[in-house]
Amino acid sequence: MGTLMLTHINLGAKARHKPKGQPVGEERPWNTRQQDNHRWNNRDLSECRLQPICPIEGRLGGARSQAEFPLRALQFKRGLLHEFRKGNASKEQVRLHDLVQQLPKAIIIGVRKGGTRALLEMLNLHPAVVKASQEIHFFDNDENYGKGIEWYRKKMPFSYPQQITIEKSPAYFITEEVPERIYKMNSSIKLLIIVREPTTRAISDYTQVLEGKERKNKTYYKFEKLAIDPNTCEVNTKYKAVRTSIYTKHLERWLKYFPIEQFHVVDGDRLITEPLPELQLVEKFLNLPPRISQYNLYFNATRGFYCLRFNIIFNKCLAGSKGRIHPEVDPSVITKLRKFFHPFNQKFYQITGRTLNWP
Ligand code: A3P
């Protein structure tokens, strides 16, 4: 039996990601575009109080290009949606504003701990996107799936018909039945997969489970003991956190139903350090006009992550459960895992056409 002697490396640098191309700090100096945004947002805020009838067209008069107009209108309408979410709307108002609960046009199918929440929240900055806040677990949970598609639709947030709804449930990526079930709902749906370097993702996965066990005062094993089979000293492929990181194996199941063009791979490591270019690629994939800007994302040095700025008043960072400090892991185990994942990663790059420079 192999004994794991541990010399530790520190992977716990979560809160110290260095942002690229932007000064560190809570706020950045404003440029002209931001001042424009500021003016626009100030104007929006006063207009966004709930009205019995939405006077959008009249209020947004003035010279605007055709392409721009609907999005501006949606930006305005988002304020109304916010009111509705707070429960400030009657059925009559929902009807008057043409609000609907739409099935998603795109789903973030995984990967767990890849940055799925950050991606969803950041896409929700786009005026044409409305997120389903909760993980719905419709396609991976037999009981929920048995409740039927109308149940699923009713779980969706209210939106305007021109907007698209996006949901995320990371368990979809690894659950056997899901691709076929999603295909039956919409065979042309767009599928987003956010991935991180597989070993880091596995450690992040372990860290989440560990935190739950510690909270319940349960005993737990070290990561090294779970990830390496003590009998063979090889990587333990029965360990779920390892299996989930073999991205190509899961993707191959999906490809039996959907062509590769319907998937977009988001680099979760880059979303942490440099989110805007990743989001711009997603906007393109979803055929959305580019509306998320650097104004919407600011690096919060205390959190060590980018946070979201919707307007001059409303900012938010992700919850503290996102960006945990990882435990230290034996470097020889890390090396072994990276070697193990390497051929699967090569295949993943080849299938998806996206090369991520993982070690
Ligand atoms: P760690 O906790 O390992 O750092 P998911 O939402 O799929 O569970 O992914 C969680 C991961 O999202 C976190 O993993 C964190 O690194 C990453 N992440 C990416 N962008 C983030 C952001 N802006 N704020 C917080 N966490 C972010």
Image: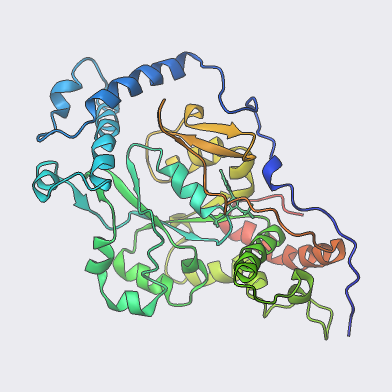
Residue at the spot x=74%, y=73% of the render?
227
Residue 164: image x %, image y %?
31, 47
Query: How many marks are shown on the rendered structure?
Result: 0
Q: Is residue 156 left or right of residue 313?
A: left
What x and y, as percent, mark residue 34? 45, 19
Q: Is residue 193 above or below residue 216?
A: above
Question: Residue 345's quadrant in the figure?
Answer: bottom right
Q: Image quadrant for the C terminus?
A: bottom right
Q: Residue at x 89, y 66 (%)?
A: 6
Q: Is residue 60 left or right of residue 257?
A: left
Visible residue check, residue 255: no
Q: State the image quarter where residue 344 is shown.
A: bottom right
Q: Position of residue 43 (x, y in %)?
A: 29, 20
Residue 101 x, y percent position in the rendering? 23, 54
Quarter residue 252 falls in: bottom right
Question: Colour scheme used in the picture?
Answer: rainbow
Q: Is the residue 267 above or below the residue 212 in the image?
A: above
Q: Residue at x 60, y 34 (%)?
A: 300
- Along the horizontal axis of the image, is 232 left or right of 82? right
Front-most of residues 159 and 28 = 28
